[in-house]
Amino acid sequence: MKKQINIPPTAVPVIDEVDERVSRFSMSRRLLSRPDLGAFAGVVLVFLFFGITASGTGMFASDGVLTWLTVTAQLMIIGTGAALLMVGGEFDLSVGSMIGFTGMMIAIPTTYFHVPIGLSVIMAFVVAMGIGALNGYIIVRTRLPSFIVTLASLFMLRGLTIALSIVFTNRTIVSGLKEYSDDSIVSWLFSAELFPGFFQWLAENDIIQSLPNGAPSVSGIPMLIVWAVVIAVIGHIVLMKTQVGNWIFASGGDANAARNVGVPVSAVKISLFMTTAFCATVYSACQVFEFGSAAADRGLLKEFEAIIAAVIGGCLLTGGYGSVIGACLGALIFGVVQMGILFTGAPNDWFQVFLGAMLLGAVIFNSSIRKRVTGEH
Amino acid sequence: MTMSIEITQEPPTHEDGEARLLIEVHDLVKHFGPVVALAGVSLDIQSSEVHCLLGDNGAGKSTLIKMLSGVHIPTKGDFFVDGKPVNFTSPRDALDAGIATVFQDLAMVPLLSITRNFFMGREPTRKIGPFSFMDMDFANHVAREEMRKIGIDIRDPQQAVGTLSGGERQCVAIARAVHFGAKVLILDEPTSALGVAQTSMVLKYIHRVRAKGIGVIFITHNVRHAYAVGDRFTVLNRGRTLGTFSKQEITLEELQTKMAGDKELQDLSDELGGTV
């Protein structure tokens, strides 16, 4: 049985054949559409640059490496959260204030009210993630830009941190946490150094440098770095290999489209805000246990550093595209350049110039990548 | 002069060969505050049919399909799926009942790969120990296979949907709905933004979907597109049905007139020599 469909005369009846105007995708093109490609190139560049200019300054000696790895690890922790959230289509500007706030939440209850340190840490995590959830809830309910909502949180949290510190302790720096935290599990969890024996052995065999007193210049792998690697690996796997990861991409790429096919967009976004809050708390816990103190102004501008790492790593400001690996590479670039400038003895102001230029370059590069991926012109 | 596309009509594939009633709605009413968007619409959809929903802007087409797909909750009226009354409160309910909607935005994210789009919201998972992962190999395989069935030469299922043409995207969206077991497929103006070749690609595909026993609700402005693939036509005007007509009962011109609200467009058409 045949049926006639009448269509206007300009129709081309055969459309199934390969359109010769569409070039085939080559491997190189696929590689080029990876979000983290630019960051990878950036890493190679900064290592080449400082490998030449900072050779002989100790930047690549074991303790030098540890200094820039520490900066990198700190930024990896909050950068991973920021990257996931940006892929999910939102920003969190309250990360820096959250670092100050949770630091105080760990320090004050223990030093002034003798709350067990473990409980203080758990409370800090719970409250931080609660605030993250509230940020997310307000954003999904009001559909206001997360930029504005979390900017409000930035000021409120910072203000609260200072005000409450003064109310409870009459000061904005709380120290003396060490005597409460020594030997506690949480202290180990956030400030231990792993494999001291191995580093001792390395020093004894002159593989790494020793201090004049014979101790190795690096006494172990700080838990900060362990946290950074664990968070980044989990973040990467969740984003790329799980159902939730697909939901994050979909929510950020087009929230309406995602909702229409049954993706729980609101839940995804709220969870992502809780994740950035969690990451901020890990950051502050590592800092508090390392220094044995907390300060109300900790974490200043860290929200921007986290976003910069994510953007250098290929995250689009509009969401739906980006990678955790990229954010980690962005953090590495950040760490190497910040410390590299110190090692080479150049004035530190140049770091900010470089950072701004790098950010601008990354954004321009990303938008060209985006055009390539979507075939827009 | 018109050129024609021949479409081989395959016999319906469902068991009894008889058309089954899939959806029935009676006197559906929807108010948005003081605004009456729908003032009582009745409609039924059978298996293996393309039921075209025609009407001018503001006729209530969008409101109607949003109720059928669970986006809006009707103010009044009866809604039956497979003869059983239903009350959808979310798009998920409609999907679970086998009613899939391809909205104009296609629910596609241009930046994401075909695979990730195809399985968006319904990702296949695989357990490794206590952890559940998205089964990417399987998803890529299915996406490639489904694209091949549509006749899209897929270069790489991981390429972004943004690289596909408008017609291809439309077909991918339809294929996705069919793959996930749609019994009723609601297509919201699938041809409105397409060129001629792209349109014929989509119309052909609609025809193939119908042959699988699926009931298709085809919303369009374009009477020609509707008449090309439609079995029955329901015309909406100002929130009411003007009637449902089978293809035998009505000509293209009559349908055009009905849709234009019987008057102005016909006059205009006469003025312009019958070309509107």
Image (cartoon, coloured by chain):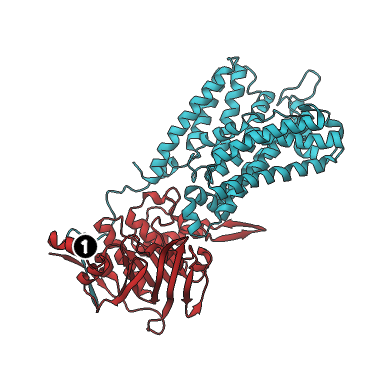
Where in the figure is residue A296, as x and y percent of width and height? 72, 29
Residue A31 as seen in the image, left or right of residue A285? left
Q: Is residue A298 visible?
A: yes
What's the residue at 33%, 54% (across, down)?
B166
Give the residue type that dot 1 points to: Glu
| Image quarter of the N terminus of chain A | bottom left
Residue A220 as seen in the image, left or right of residue B197? right
The colour assigned to chain B within the rendered structure: red
Q: Which residue is labeled 1 in the image?
A: B264
Residue A32 as seen in the image, left or right of residue A166? left
Front in this rendered view, residue A309 or B100: B100
Q: Is residue A274 visible?
A: no
What's the residue at 68%, 32% (across, down)?
A159
Q: Could you say which chain is coloured cyan in the image?
A: A
- Say if A206 sits above or below A259 in the image: above
Picture quarter containing residue B184?
A: bottom left
What's the residue at 48%, 34% (across, down)?
A38
Where in the figure is residue A368, as x and y percent of width and height? 40, 37
Where in the figure is residue A136, as x and y percent of width and height? 60, 46
Q: Chain of mark 1?
A: B
Where in the figure is residue B200, as x and y percent of width and height? 27, 62
